[in-house]
Image (cartoon, helix red, strand yellow):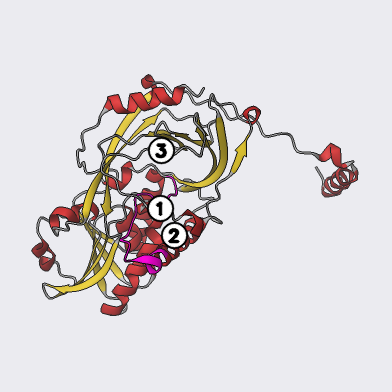
Amino acid sequence: MQRRHLLAAGGAALALPAAALDFAPPRAPAAMRVSPDRIIDIAVGIRPFRAQGPRIEAERRFGKTLVHHYGHGGSGWSLSWGSAQRALALVQAAAKPGERIAVIGCGAIDLTTARTAQQAGFKVRLYAKDRPPRVHSSAATGLWTPDSRIVASEQAGEAWAAGWEAMARASFKVHQGYLGLPSGPVEWHDGYVVSNEGFDTALPGHVGEPDYPDLHPRIADLRPLGKALEAGEHPFRAGQARRFTQLVFNIPAYQRLLLDDFARDCGELVQREFRQPRDFARLPERLVVNCTGDGARTLLGDTGMTPVRGQTARLIPQPEVDYALIYRGQNVVALPRRDGLLIAAMGEHDFGSDDLRPDRAQSEDAVRRLATLF
């Protein structure tokens, strides 16, 4: 269409009555094809829950400066960039500009810490036993949940909550820079929370889990609760539903992009396993950022650490499914990731468990529960 025709068409549209310009009603969400025979992979990872909250502090040990940066529970990907900025301040206080530093690990916290240090002008060498997808962060669900399994002592009070909010907001800001890229590392998706009993019914906790603080009001502008829907406004076989919009991480693409960016900026990746704290002393770098996650429980003897087992199943991708689904009261979450329809469910005894053996029956049961909605 020539430009004058395009402008004429636009002018004609503007002259139409308002009723003729009404947008078509949103189409009904495509049904998820959820059945056990569509499971193509099951992954198990360990969330590094720390009763005192994330450890972000420096100490002198073995003639080196150790910056500890671990213990983010189920919020590693969500808090990663903001938390890395706090760790960077400790690095800058102890290292010379442009100095080479070491970062231990290759998960969400480790990769974003390394990239944050590179962007600040430091040379970085990553030391890790494994790399994606053989790290715990690869088994994460991928929903932006900065308050997932994160808690602090009552004595921490307002200062701790304000620090958490600052990390959440800083991370959210950085994640926006990854929107629109060809690999889709970060994307916005609509979603639905559905419930048979209603949203005011209290849900029982899992065995051994603490009471988590209600941090949502502090970031309600970034993650609104969403709109309650009437029975005729959603297609699910559930009594009530609420629609929301939230960030989703396509974790394989995100990890690959971070590794590529790290290598492009002359980062080095060395395969090495650390079995005792003194192994840090053998590194040539004067400053070491310890991002070992759950590994700190045994490596450093951090008694505040508690492993939390997490299992996800991937179903054959369904590109037409572009919404997340949380089945409240049934402990099932489904995410429309590019590598497949991801199904996650928490087991009754996962808190305190570091068992990495896949439990196919657990995933199949979650898939069947989800199937009852369609």
Relative depth, front residue between 213 and 25: 213
| Residue tagged 3 | 203
Q: Position of residue 264 (x, y in %)?
A: 36, 60
| Disc 2 residue crowd, few under 14, some 14–19, many 20+, Cα 10 Å | many
Q: Residue at x 47, y 56 (%)?
A: 175
Q: Quadrant of residue 258?
A: bottom left
| Residue tagged 1 | 147
Q: Residue at x 47, y 54 (%)?
A: 216
Q: Residue at x 33, y 28 (%)?
A: 363
| Residue tagged 2 | 168
Q: Position of residue 46 (x, y in %)?
A: 26, 45
Relative depth, front residue between 281 and 248: 248
State the SS at label 1. loop
Q: Nearer the viewer, mark 1 or mark 2?
A: 1
231 in relation to 156, above or below:
above
Which numbered disc, 1 or 2, marks the residue that appears first in the sequence? 1
Residue type (three-letter) at the residue carrying disc 1:
Asp
Q: Nearer the viewer, mark 1 or mark 3?
A: 3
Which numbered disc, 3 or 2, marks the residue that appears first in the sequence? 2
Q: Is residue 158 magenta?
A: yes
